[in-house]
Amino acid sequence: SCHSLRARQRLITRGGEWSPRNPQQKIIKRVIGLEGDFIRTMGYKNRYVKVPDGHFWIEGDHHGHSLDSNSFGPVSVGLLHGRASHIIWPPHRWQRISPALPPNRGPLEINEDQE
Amino acid sequence: MFRGLLGKTLGFVGYTIQYGCIAHCAFEYIGEFVVCSGPSMEPTIVSHDIVFSERMSRHLYKIQKGDIVIAKSPYDPAMNICKRVIGLEGDKVSTRSDIFTSHTYVPKGHVWLEGDNLRNSTDSRSYGPIPYGLIRGRVCLKLWPPHTFGTLGENPNKQNVKSFKDSD
């Protein structure tokens, strides 16, 4: 599951999961960062966040109207319920949901070797 | 003869699928057997004990303070942890450190876990409260070793947790 997400190309998916604040509710968000990634946050208490082990950083595509990691921080992978792969209703919305990072939202590339 | 063998094979596969589904539903909604390892819940549970963890309380949101729960580890989703619930959402718990004691409120949708063996337990005192959604089940019965078969004991440590729901 999460380990297969950690491909070279950063396969980013939408995940359906239990909300960390309300355990009776499932939320659907996009995975922006995996464990170890550095994220520039939008409206979170810290400007930059390193995603801890066993967690990921999720965001709704509609920023500002979204209850996501920018509100409650990194989310434990154990809360992941599934991956949203297709839209099946209404019929005119049938489509496969493909993994894609929104523009300017993604893990920061940290250069390890700086001369 | 071949058709007889094919019929028997299909029948066997059918039974396997049926029992597989029933077993899956049982483990998902009724309970599961758990082999515990580690010293963090001594003396209540010791390494190599086998316990039964029921799923109903978790699905019905009836986990209570003092319950022993099996939960997914917040930092490694492939690992499970077995701890006692010390505080529910809204409760005020004390976070003991080597030098001083401070207090914190358990956020909404989270629980505070501690092992019974406080000296040798990595729990919420290190990693903070964990989301309720990580809880898998409530340990209700110890099955092995046979001389300790039965329900599990209360928290051996003195707890002073002010509950959000207490009215006084």
Image (cartoon, coloured by chain):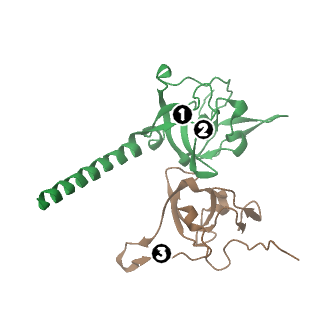
Three-letter residue code for mark 1: Gln
Spot occupied by residue B18 in the image (x, y as percentages of width and height): 27, 50
Q: CA distance from mark 1 to mark 2?
A: 7 Å
Q: Are marks 1 and 2 in contact (CB under 8 Å)?
A: yes
Please check whether the numbered discs 3 and 1 fall on a single chain.
no
**Badge 3: how crowded within 10 Å, few (<14), some, or many (20+)?**
few
Along the viewing direction, whichever of A70 and B148 lies nearer the viewer:
B148
In front of the other: label 3 or label 1?
3
Q: Secondary structure at mark 3?
A: loop
Spot occupied by residue B114 in the image (x, y as percentages of width and height): 65, 35
The brown one among the chains is A
Residue at label 3?
A97
Q: Quadrant of residue A101?
A: bottom right
Three-letter residue code for mark 2: Leu
Q: Secondary structure at mark 2?
A: loop
Q: Give the residue at x 73% y 31%.
A: B119
Q: Quadrant of the C terminus of chain B?
A: top right
The green one among the chains is B
Q: CA distance from mark 2 to mark 3?
A: 37 Å
Q: Give the residue at x 42% y 73%.
A: A87
Residue at label 2?
B88
